[in-house]
Each structure stands twice: as C-alpha cells, then as structure tokens.
C-alpha cells in the first residue's frame, strides 16, 4: 500500500514535469539575451530607456543625425550575417547616398501599383494558397507561397512559375528561420535564388537602379522583394489570422463586418505584434537632449517597437481592436508606428501592405473558420499553428476539440524544445557573425562583397 509521502513526491514531480513548458522557455529566453549581450557587446542605447523616455521617442527617431544604418555598429554584423548574400545591397542597410537614392526610387516605383490591381493580385495569390488547405496548418507557411507569387508578379509583371515560387519560399523561409534562431543559414538555398534572379534580369518589367552590376541588381531585388516583402507580408497576415483564431468574437465580427472593422483588427494586431522588434540607427552627429545631455555621434540607438507600442495604452497586453474605433484618438497621435517613422526611412510599402493584408484576411475569412490554442507571441517562432475548418461545417465536434487540445499540448512541448535550440543555434550564429564581421570588413574595404 502506498504511503502519503511517496504519493506527494510523485504528484510534485508530475506537476513539475507538466509545468516545465510553462516556465522553462521564459528562463531560456532570458539566458539567450544574456549570452547574446556577452558575445555581441552591450554597445547600444535603448529607446525608450533611462536616457530617452517614451515622450521623446518620435523626436529622437526623426532627428536628422539618427541616420546611419550599418557602419559602426557591431549589431550590423549580425543583421548582415542573417541577410546574406548581398546585405550591402539590401535597401534597409544601405547608407544614405546616391546608391541608396537610386535603389529607394526603384522600390517606390515597383510598389506603386494601382489599388484595384493590387487587390486583384492578392486575391488570386491567396486563393491559390488556400485552395486545398484544411485541417491544421502553420499560418506563416500557408501564406508564404502567396506572397512569393505576389512579389514575383510585381517585379516581373507575369504570373510566377512554380519553380521560381519554390526558390523564393526557400530563400525567405531560410532567412526568417535563421533570424529567429530556429535554424542555421543554408546559403545554397539563397544562392540558388541569386543565380536565378541574375539570369532573369532581362525579364524584369521595371528599370533597375543604374550604376549597379548585374549581381548587385539581383541582390537588391532579392533583399527587398524576395526576402523582406515575402517575410513581412507572410508574418503580418499570419499574425492577424492568429489573433482572429484566438478571439472568436472578433473573428465573427470581422467576417460579417465591413473593412473599417478589419482595419481596426489589423492596426491592433500590428500594435501588439509589431514586425520589427528593434530598429537600430547609428548617429552621424551629436543629438542634444537639453540640460547638458547629448547623445554623441557614433552612438547606436535601438528603437524598441514593442515597448513604444505598449506605452500610453490602457491594459496594453489585451487584444482590443476597439482602441482604433472611429471617435477615438486619431491614429497619428497614438504610439503606433508599425511602418516606421515617416521622417526616417519608413517602410516603402506602408500604402500597399495594409490594403493587400485586408484582402488576404478577407479571402481567408470567406473560405474558413480559424481556431487556435497555440501560443501567440511577437516573434511567432511556432509559425502560427491553426485549425482551418471550411465554413458551414458544424461548430466544434469532439474531433475538433481533441485536435485543439492536442495542438496546445504539442505547442507547449515544441516551445520547450525550440527555446533550447534557439539558445544553442543563436549563440553559435552570434559568435559566427562577430567572427565574420561582414559589415565591418565591407566598410574597411576588406571585403568586395559581403557574400556569406
Ligand atoms: C505589414 C507588412 C510590413 C511591415 C509592418 C513593415 C514594417 C517596416 C518598418 C517598421 C520599417 C522601418 C524600419 C526602420 O526604421 O529601420 C520598414 C522598412 C522597410 N520595408 Fe517594410 N514592412 C512591411 C512590408 C514591406 C513590404 C511588402 C516591402 C516590399 C518591398 C517592404 C520593404 C521595406 C524596405 C525596403 C524597408 C527599408 C526602407 C529604407 O530604409 O529605405 N516592407 N518596414
């Protein structure tokens, strides 16, 4: 017969084991942050932070001296490593100057698609991605082929062949997986796309930036359109769908309501889950703060989007599209800058992205009901597990309830394993990036092309 003590110990051990997925990932994330800082150096000024408060976030971000993008920040070595090949041609990381202006102009032209055409293109690409998608999916994976085809058609002006779509998805998925430290880089996947784009340049429907070699032009397109555009749109739509899957009341209202409510849902999703965690700038001159304080030239400022987006909102962790309802404070007055600061290199897709997102979400809501019991965090490392049920199927039978229960348990344990993987791979990549010094070598003339 069992005595009370062993039973109590058994219960305690079981509770500890079952609870592990709840407490350990958080500890591992904290440890990862600590290791990153040790390896990468603690060189930056967080904004908002002790020196610059939330009230001066916009002012400092908009300051003309907050303009350096890459040169002089150890952090840049890490971003260049993740965005290779060709980070020196990636618009986000180009320093101001003639080359940047030429590239930014072409991006603006490619993105200046008439609204009706952008909506029709989105509808077509997303409908194809949804065609046979039922059951449990990962929303980011579901969306990525759609945005690969979308970007391809913007650049080449013709439908995307499956071969090219697979190359683009292979590239974008590899970049975002490495960025989140969920996997190492696979340069072969990325190089295959560069080779394809280089040979396809004559078919591009737009005039490309002058003064660049063919490889540089291909790398520019790869960075802006087949990496950033595909990753950002896939993640943005996955976040909105995930939020709807976890808030059935909001989902029902979004399905039946008009686009104004959908816009509120999108705004609130991008507030709570901004795609940029940190955007950094290297100061090219002193920034006076008043009362004798100055941010000296050469400082690295890290603008923290999640912290800014939470400040000034009551109960900021709650998902509440009503914050953006008509009659509330105008959006420009809120701490809400999902597409960056207008005065300092904002996102060139800030007009196109929201309208394409709206159509993508609407198409998905028309096709199916979404349910998820998986965790929803800003970096979305689980890629958004979600149950898609065709509309018209009766609500939650026992099979669906079991699926959702299994999804939750699986997500917990996957999260535990993933946090350990992220710790190990992240530490390795931070170390490898510091060792490779792609950005530093580029600016010191030590590397012709920061290839890999
Ligand atoms: C919902 C989707 C998107 C969001 C939330 C988003 C967000 C942002 C943000 C916050 C920045 C500024 C970061 C900084 O200050 O350093 C940015 C820059 C940029 N984004 Fe987006 N983006 C999205 C979609 C896209 C798409 C579709 C493209 C297509 C090409 C794109 C291309 C770029 C580029 C090239 C930059 C760098 C701008 C420059 O430095 O001149 N983004 N994005």
Image (cartoon, grey):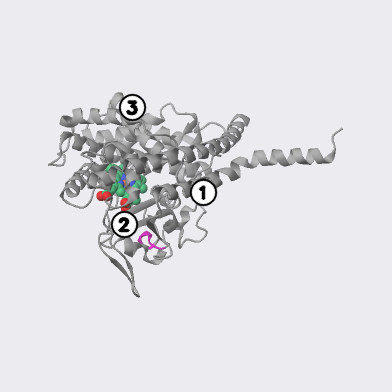
Where does the N terminus fall, quadrant-wise? top right
Q: Which of the 4 image quadrants contains residue 429?
A: top left
Q: Which of the 4 image quadrants contains residue 306?
A: bottom left
| 441 and 307: which is toward the camera | 441
Point 42% across, 36% down: residue: 140
Q: Secondary structure at mark 3?
A: helix
Relative height, residue 370 to residue 378 (above, below): above
Between discs 1 and 2, the one toward the N terminus: 1
Drawn side of residue 426 relative to residue 211, left or right: right
Give how far apart the Cα atoms at labels 3 and 2 are.
Answer: 33 Å
Residue 393 seen in the figure: yes
Q: Main secondary structure of the magenta part?
A: helix
| 141 and 389: which is toward the camera | 141
Give how far apart the Cα atoms at labels 1 and 2 are.
Answer: 29 Å
Q: Residue tagged by mark 1?
A: 30
Q: Secondary structure at mark 1?
A: helix
**Mark 2 crowd level (few <14, some 14–19, many ≥20, 10 Å Cα):** some
Point 12% across, 41% down: residue: 211
Residue 349 seen in the figure: no
Q: Residue tagged by mark 3?
A: 166
Give how far apart the Cα atoms at labels 1 and 3 are.
Answer: 35 Å
Q: Cβ(mark 2) to ligand 1 < 8 Å?
A: yes
Q: Residue tagged by mark 2?
A: 341
Q: Please check the rendered image and state whether residue 389 is part of the magenta-colored stretch, yes or no.
A: no
Between discs 3 and 2, the one toward the N terminus: 3
Q: Cβ(mark 3) to ligand 1 < 8 Å?
A: no
The percent coordinates of residue 439 (x first, y second) are 28, 45
The disc placed on residue 274 is none
Q: Are marks 1 and 2 in contact (CB under 8 Å)?
A: no
Magenta stretch? 329-333
Where does the C terminus fall, quadrant-wise? top left
The percent coordinates of residue 330 (x first, y second) are 38, 62
């Amino acid at each position: 017969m069992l005595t009370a003590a062993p039973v109590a110990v058994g219960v305690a051990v079981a509770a500890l084991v079952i609870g592990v997925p709840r407490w350990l990932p958080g500890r591992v994330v904290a440890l990862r942050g600590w290791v990153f800082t040790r390896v990468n150096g603690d060189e930056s000024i967080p904004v908002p932070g002790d020196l610059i408060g939330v009230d001066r976030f916009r002012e400092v971000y908009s300051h003309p001296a907050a303009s350096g993008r890459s040169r002089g920040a150890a952090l840049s070595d890490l971003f260049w490593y993740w965005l290779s090949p060709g980070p020196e041609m990636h618009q986000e990381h180009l320093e101001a100057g003639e080359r940047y202006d030429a590239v930014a102009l072409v991006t603006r032209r490619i993105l200046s698609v008439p609204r009706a055409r952008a909506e029709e293109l989105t509808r077509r690409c997303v409908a194809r991605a949804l065609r046979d998608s039922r059951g449990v999916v990962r929303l980011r994976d579901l969306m990525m082929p759609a945005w690969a085809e979308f970007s391809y058609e913007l650049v080449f002006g013709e439908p995307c062949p499956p071969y090219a779509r697979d190359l683009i998805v292979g590239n974008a998925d590899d970049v975002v997986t490495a960025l989140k430290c969920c996997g190492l880089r696979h340069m072969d996947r990325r190089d295959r796309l560069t080779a394809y784009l280089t040979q396809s340049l004559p078919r591009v429907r737009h005039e490309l930036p002058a003064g660049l070699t063919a490889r540089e032009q291909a790398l520019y397109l790869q960075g802006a359109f087949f990496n950033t555009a595909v990753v950002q749109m896939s993640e943005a739509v996955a976040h909105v769908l995930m939020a709807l899957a976890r808030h059935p009341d909001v989902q029902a209202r979004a399905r039946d309501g008009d686009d104004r409510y959908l816009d509120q849902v999108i705004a609130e999703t991008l507030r709570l889950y901004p795609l940029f965690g940190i955007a950094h700038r290297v100061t090219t001159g002193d920034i006076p703060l008043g009362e004798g304080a100055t941010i000296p030239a050469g400082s690295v400022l890290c603008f923290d989007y999640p912290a800014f987006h939470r400040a000034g909102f009551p109960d900021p962790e709650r998902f509440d599209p009503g914050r953006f309802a008509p009659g509330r404070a105008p959006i420009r007055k809120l701490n809400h800058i999902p597409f960056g600061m207008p005065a300092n290199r904002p996102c060139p897709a800030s007009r196109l992205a929201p309208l394409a997102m709206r159509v993508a979400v609407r198409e998905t809501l028309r096709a199916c009901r979404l349910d998820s019991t998986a965790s929803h965090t800003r970096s979305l490392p689980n890629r958004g597990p979600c149950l898609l049920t065709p509309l018209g199927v009766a609500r939650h039978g026992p099979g669906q309830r079991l699926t959702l229960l299994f999804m939750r348990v699986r997500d917990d344990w996957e999260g535990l394993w993933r946090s350990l993987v992220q710790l190990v791979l992240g530490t390795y990549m931070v170390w490898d990036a510091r060792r490779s010094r792609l950005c530093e070598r580029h600016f010191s003339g030590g590397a012709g092309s920061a290839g890999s």
